[in-house]
């Protein structure tokens, strides 16, 4: 694995899979993304968290935890394989994990999460097939 790291952010190229990932944030908000090669290449170790985060934000969101004191802390798992994809990541839950149904709805609603739609639709179909076409409330990913 090849890493780039700056103040408040870290990115990784997993040479065994050819995939790229990045994380930024800390106590109040933490984000983990899958990046393109171009996004990874544009990251420079002199960048601030904000500069690197604006590049990563264009990637596919894998995981997010928020504890901004505007409400109760929460965690959103966009891709339940985030731990296997990024074993090096500092992903840590700061509150209750959103259920799959809420995450699916947010991905469909928010333009900022459009990069997750294909993956979430595929996973939703797999969950529905595994449960015989229906899914019970609360069948989401938990920590």
Image: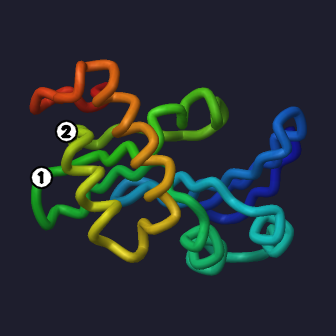
Quadrant for the C terminus, please. top left
Tell me where residue 5 appears, x and y as whole percent. 75, 57
**Mark 2 or 1, which is nearer the eye?**
2
Position of 98 relative to 71 (above/below) = above
Q: Is residue 111 left or right of residue 48?
A: left
Residue 124 in the image: state x and y as whole percent: 34, 39
Q: What's the residue at 24%, 20% (across, down)?
A: 132
Name the image colouring.
rainbow
**Residue, x 24% and y 63% (percent of image)?**
68
Task: State which quarter of the image contains the N terminus.
Answer: top right
Q: Is residue 42 left or right of residue 102?
A: right
**Secondary structure under the numbered disc 1 in the rendered image:** loop
Q: Position of residue 136 (x, y in %)?
A: 12, 27
- Is residue 122 shown left or right of residue 16? left
The residue identified by callout 2 is 96
Disc 2 and disc 1 in contact, CB within 8 angstroms? yes
According to the image, label 1 marks what residue? 72
In three-dimensional space, the C-alpha distance between marks 2 and 1, rounded to whole angstroms, equals 9 Å
- The residue lying toward the viewer, choosing from 47 and 59, is 59
Query: Observer-nearest residue: 33 or 48?
Result: 33
Q: Which residue is at a point 33% across and 28% down the rendered structure image?
A: 127
Q: Earlier in the sequence, mark 2 or mark 1?
A: 1
* Residue at screen point 75% across, 63% down: 36
**Residue 128 position (above or below residue 40):** above
Tally of marks: 2
Residue 102 placement (x, y as % from top left): 20, 50
How packed mark 2 is, by other alpha carbons closer than 10 Å (few <14, some 14-19, many 20 or more), is: some
Determine the secondary structure under disc 2. strand
Image quarter of residue 15: top right
Say above or below: 77 vs 48: above
Label 1 crowd (10 A; few <14 / some 14-19 / many >=20): few
């Amino acid at each position: 694995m090849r890493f780039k790291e700056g103040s408040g952010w870290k990115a990784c190229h997993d040479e065994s899979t050819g995939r790229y990932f990045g994380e930024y944030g800390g106590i109040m908000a933490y984000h983990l993304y899958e990046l393109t090669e171009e996004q990874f290449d544009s990251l420079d170790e002199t960048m601030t968290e904000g500069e690197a985060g604006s590049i990563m934000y264009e990637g596919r969101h894998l995981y997010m935890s928020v504890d901004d004191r505007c409400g109760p802390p929460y965690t959103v798992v966009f891709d339940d394989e985030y731990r296997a994809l990024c074993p090096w990541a500092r992903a840590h839950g700061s509150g209750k994990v959103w259920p799959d149904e809420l995450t699916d709805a947010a991905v469909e609603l928010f333009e900022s999460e459009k990069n997750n739609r294909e993956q979430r639709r595929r996973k939703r179909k797999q969950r529905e097939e595994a449960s015989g076409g229906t899914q019970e409330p609360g069948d989401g990913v938990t920590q």
